[in-house]
Image (cartoon, helix red, strand yellow):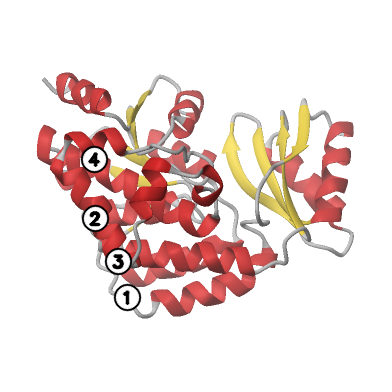
Amino acid sequence: MSVAFVFPGQGSQTVGMGKALADAFGPAKAVFQEVDEALGEKLSAVIFEGPAETLTLTENTQPALMAVSLAVIRVLEAEAGLDLKRDAAFVAGHSLGEYSALAAAGALTVADTARLVRIRGRAMQKAVPVGTGAMAALLGLDFDTAAAVAAEAAQGQVCQAANDNGGGQVVVSGDKAAVERAVELAKTKGAKRAMLLTVSAPFHCALMQPAADVMAEALSKVTVKAPVVPVVANVLAKPISDPAEIVRSLVAQVTGTVRWRECVGFMAGAGVTTFYEAGAGKVLTGLAKRLAEGATASAVGTPDDIAAFKASRG
């Protein structure tokens, strides 16, 4: 049980992701159809064909990435005999990916997850008027230094550490002027680079409270089951299985820090030596290799990746 499955978040999307899987494997195609039905629209057409600007709208990106991740898991179950309960010690996902992890582990249905992340995407977009918030990456600072920079830059506004990605990558989020101050301040504190990110809203900070309220209401209307494998929660950096605690952590996650460095550290400390990133891109694969010394990490998102996964399991 030295295996963990991790699920990517926003930023990993590309037009065409998941198409080869859907073309090659019935279970993958079925997931995209299920998401289309749940949302009442052909999101799969946007995922497979674009345009990119439609896919990158937060309300589309979130269910799209979840669909690709779940398609991968369904194909692994059908083609490689994957059984998360038997084969994985933990699942975890980065921000939006936490929903994918919960769906993969059976805590949420795919249809409910698609609707929840569509609501989440819209609520996060609407929480702050466009242009008033910002996010910035501070590279080369440890988390405590970056958090101190954010606190100093706030000056009565919101500026907080949003993502602790590890490897000297911390993202801060908040009011635009405060985040701009943090970028300048970080350079004086030894940051290798500090730059504003192209994002549509300041995620994972106190400005997202309206979205957290929306998610609390949305989550109260769906059935959350105990996952078949513990989910390492973003805001707690520890595994949880109790449905009420899962809901609380998902609500807290909207305004709270994604503690990814600590999540990976927890899993590695608990004996995980192999990480599989299920879905689009390879962001978490790179982070796992840096954060979990001696661990192997690989991305599974294409038919070739499925074949490699099957081969590795003999």
- Circle 2 residues within 10 Å: few <14, some 14–19, many ≥20: some
Q: Residue at x 54, y 66 (%)?
A: 122
Secondary structure type for disc 3: helix
The kind of residue tagged 3 is Ala
Q: Nearer the viewer, residue 148 or 269?
A: 148
Give the mark nearer the N terminus: 2 vs 4: 4
Q: Name the residue at 27% across, 64% down.
A: 37
**Can the viewer see residue 227 in this picture?**
no
Please provide percent x and percent y for residue 295. Answer: 38, 23
Q: Which residue is mark 3?
A: 38
Residue plotted at (65% across, 69% down): 127
Q: Earlier in the sequence, mark 1 or mark 2?
A: 2
Position of 282 with respect to 202 (left or right) is left
The CA span between labels 2 and 4 is 10 Å
Query: In the shown orientation, is residue 287 left or right of residue 229?
Result: right
Residue matched to label 4: 22
Disc 1, SS: loop
The residue mark sitting in front, 1 or 2, is 2
Above or below for 300 versus 72: above
Dot 3 or dot 2: first in sequence order is 2
Residue type at mark 2?
A: Gln
